[in-house]
Amino acid sequence: MARIWDPLQYGWSPGYWLTIQGIPLLASEMNFGLTPPAGYTDDPGSLVIDEGASVGQRVERDRGIGVGYPLTFRLLDTAAVRAQIKVWTKTAVLQADVSAVATSFEVDSTAGWAPGDHFHIGAERVLIDALAAAPPRFTGCTRHVNGIAYTHKADATATCRITDLPRYWLGRIVELWALPVDPSGYVPGSAMTDDAELVFHGHISAGPDRVGDEWQFEALSLDRVLARPLSSALTGKVIDTEFRRLALPFLKIVYHFASYDFAGALVWSHDLVTIPMATDLATDLLSETEIMSRISTSFAAAAAGTGGNVETIAWKAVEGIDNGQHIKNVWMAMFAFGTDATINTLHTRITVGGWVNDESWHVGGKLSTGIHLWSKWCGHIHPGSLGWVNGPPQDVAAVRMDDALGADVPAAGFAKIGDVVYEFKASGASNDTVFLSGLKTIAGQVPTQDLTKETVEILRTDTAPMPDLLLRQFMSSGTANLRSPVTLHDRLDQTQGYGISETLIHVAGIENVCGALFGQTPLTVPSSGQSTEEALCPLLALSGRALVAKPVDHDESGAPDTSRAYRISMVRTGPSGGSYAATITDAHIIASDPAAVEVRRLGDPPTRIRVQGQIAGEDVAPIVVNDKGREQAQSPSELSFTIPMIERNPIVSMVTTWARARFASDQSAREVDVLTVPWIDAEIGDLVRLTSVHPGLVDLVTGAAGAFDGVARVIGSSIMYDTGVRRWTLLFGGYITSLSLCPSAEISLASAYPPIVNSTIDVPFKYYPHFAQLLAQDGVITLTLYDPGSAEQVADPYGYTFDGVEEVAGVCRLTVASLLNGAEVVTPALSRLATPKTATATTYQNAHLMHDGDGTSWGAGG
Amino acid sequence: MAINSNTPLSVVAEATFNALPVADKDPLLTILENANGMYEAHAPALISALYTCEHLITGRSAVFWIPVLPSIDGLDYDFSHWVYGGAGVGAVTITVEEYIAGWGAIHASGALGLAAATWLRHNHTTAISASATILRVTISRAAGSEFSPSAILVRPGTNAPAVGVKASGFVPFDDGMLAVGTSDAGINTEHLNRGPQNAMAILRDRRQCVWSFVQEYSQTDAVYSTYTSPLSDTVPACFGQAVGLIPFAHDPVVTVYAIGVVDGGATTDLIDVYQVGKSGVKLDADGAVQSASLTLEMDASGTIEARAKIGADAACKAGQVTHIAAVIVLWRPGD
């Protein structure tokens, strides 16, 4: 945020303008004399934000999310504003679903509308190119004018109404932009976007309300969207548990019939090859009656070519023994043949998908039309498809849906029936009834009780590694990749995501900070009726991370991001870390304010951390970690989290480690609020270096007061838009003995092979902060060279010293000052530079990095 | 400074990590040498097959073609061949060839003694080239003596990790920085990452045989073909069904490798390898190795008993005969 605030120290001031999604009006504080963005009309002077308090946010460490402060703004009652707020005059009702890219809208009537009109549907504004009849519709439409496109669903109750002016304002996106205004009132540039910086992105939560003679709105920050529950679960009731099975479109049934006369000579034989469910889809659910009907039909078609030797197939349910079990409803296939007195024996062989049932029958010249030879149906090899029913079916349920949205039920997923969560392998819908099959509990058991009349919630779920879960929830819109043409995370149903554009999400930051959470281990999370904050943020909180919305100035690897766009990102919330983003000194603190530095302790640290794991919303055994020593001294206080998982065991050790880290650091951690000038270049989640002689600040390592010089985590940041005063909430202390792993930087390129004095060696940019600080502290960088997989370091010292480090074209470039052991072979993409052994260790290394003696640092003496 | 391997593995107790405030050399050194040990010792069967063939063969050799996808590191493999001897005392010879662009011998047993009505187990350690696609095993016995090829087991032998990054991605760990001399080297990020990365490289490189069916390559000598099926030659014949086990697997994706042969005519999609009652893949019977991926829906999914019943069928065109010489189903962790 510092860029727009930098000029304030030279007498400049900020000026603001604001847009609202779907509204072609651009409200600004003053006449900037600049060209507004395409599609907008500037209404100079109509924006009032001075009444607003500070804008910013604070990380809720125990919730794993940043909570942005709301923005309050007012619009003057100008003619342009009034024209948008008044009641609409034209209306129509959507008649058919519309995708986010479709250009035709079928409506009940186009009466009163004309080409060139705009209409509002949901939060989207659309331009009509033409009208058409039969059915009435708007065609050639230009989508997402002044905003973004959505998928729109028609509803039988005619609730999706189209109007020529906004029906509602709640939920619309608000963007507040700041421009630098020089002391004479001049704004540089020619367009309003030239030097503007987005300082707030959120959604209207209240308004327009008449306050005095103005219209007042309130907007919640972008991150607050993530507290909005996603669509509620589809609900219904089990109406029966009749037997239905997935169709097997490729199942081949082969019938071989052969007849022999009294001399044993073959009279006739026929091979009938049938694929009875060839026209069904693999996802179709069929009852037993339907399956047998298909078999009969296909058999009859094949038998027609036997010249009357083979006639029909019929079915009879009997009881019997199969594989040692007493079975009800064994379906017996009964075949009928044409009359032929010369036949003494018949041989039948039925092959169903590889299973063979082979039988011979003695008929003794009595074969006549209508005789039935039984062949027990060989379904027991396909218990999931054909054959017998062993008592009432246990793994199916027919569900009457409450809201007639059966088609929205996912093909496979999870359903809560009664109080138990079941996974279902397949589903099929017919009108308002949905058939679920392959029901098993999370533990893999089929239902043991009759499910009829139980209530059902169809849970929409997603299974993926943690970063992907988050990114899919953020972006999914119901239209594949509508919101994510680059990152391709928009892939879930409309009801499973917030439909946030990828340009508002710091994908690299989330993947980098979150990537280490279980690696690629997938989690299953229900996305029905829960918000991201409820479903996923507890896991982030537990692991010392949080989602925030902030201007992004660099990614987690340290590479600069010059766009500085306001985006949802992820930050760490612990008080310690690597390099810091900025320094706050006494010179920055607003000395005139007696409350400029206020230190307070954290809330009561927990003595017990309880983690309730859920697999698709179903509780598993909790994990509890206690701070026993502290419990002896005081009453227990519990901090609890509910997190998604697929298996419990891999999570236990991680939870234990996170809990211990929390116990250890919270005892001595402190928060401090600091009021400063606005141009300090740091954002929420960053580390800053705080250097102050304020007596309230105590260095808990040395115990010294009034001489604080240490790093602190920014967990809150806000700015008063009228005064420019910035309030920082910093987390510091909480020190535990913690050292960094030594860097091991892979060499990507050298300017000479082998490198010599003044050669340059390139390594990934992420090592730049390390090496820059090392050079700043020691005046020289000493690094050892080794090739993984080969003899690693044959001598000591071995490698190079460097006297230069710079960022060049996205890499960290080191300049060789000397060779420690003569010329050495360097292989790009293999050779590495790491911190050296004791003999050549440096001050920085001694203080901050681990060595292999006992895991501690080299210490001051090396 | 040396590349040492922990064989057997030295398991680091979880408590070791919990007790440490920061990473330490000792568990890290052990972990890295465990990964070296894993390179030596991890030996899932590449081929585990019972031959389907005529009992008590005499007067000819038995020749088997078996698809393989060996380690990309060109590892040594331990072979075991089991042969039953019927009447006669003639010597047995076993040769193994690998196919790359052509056949090349990789093992010749010489004369192996086998008494009447006894079993022979012949072991040898032989490298399989990384690019080999088929192994051809030829078993012979002197004329007049009977033999029954029974089984073959091929799995990675003891392969001590030598210097240099391997094609599989495995990076041998040399203790020069962590355990030699004055020590005091840094605990660096690459060393910490190398252990799990090496483990993954090994697991992903060494395929594991889940299911197999192998009979003689010659249609004349093979026991089963569509011709020998009691069904007519227009009907698919089931060559075999058996249960494959992949403990703890959830819906694993296996790769089916098959060699099928016809005596003439079209070859397309004549072989069907499937999970019984579930999905399957169709492969050509053109005499070459054909492969396809198949996702299994495991019974007892996720448990130690996770299993799937797999079958292989073959069909033939009118007037032609198809036979399956071999089907090997391979899996690797992560698929």
Image (tube, coloured by chain):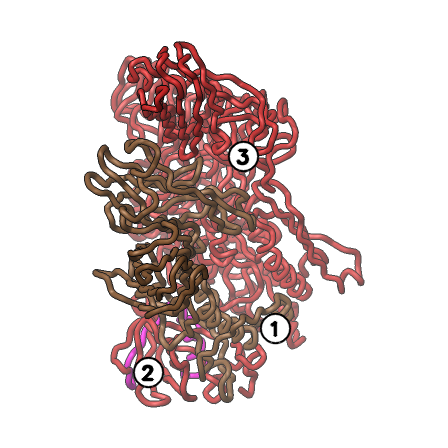
- Looking at the rendered image, the disc whose residue lies closer to the viewer, 3 or 2, is 3
Q: Amino acid at mark 2?
A: Val
Horizontal placement of A74 versus A186: left or right? right
| Residue found at x 47% / y 78% | B4
Chain letter for the brown part:
B
In the foreground, B78 or A743? B78
Q: Amino acid at mark 3?
A: Leu
Q: Residue at x 28, y 31 (%)?
A: B234
| Magenta region | A755-783
Residue A55: within the magenta? no
Residue lying farthest left? B265
Whole-Å distance between the Cαs marked 1 and 2?
33 Å
**Mark 1 highlights which residue?**
A737
Residue A215 shows up from this direction: no
Of mark 3 and mark 2, the one earlier in the sequence is: 3
- Spot occupied by residue A129 in the image (x, y as percentages of width and height): 25, 24
Q: Amino acid at mark 1?
A: Thr
Residue sitting at x 46%, y 39%: A498
Q: Which residue is mark 2?
A: A816
Q: Chain of mark 2?
A: A
Residue highlighted by disc 3 = A459
Q: Is residue A763 magenta?
A: yes
Q: Secondary structure at mark 3?
A: strand
Q: Are marks 1 and 2 on the same chain?
A: yes
- Label 1 or label 3, whichever comes before in sequence order: 3
Q: Earlier in the sequence, mark 1 or mark 2?
A: 1
Q: From the viewer's perspective, is residue B31 above or below residue B204? A: below
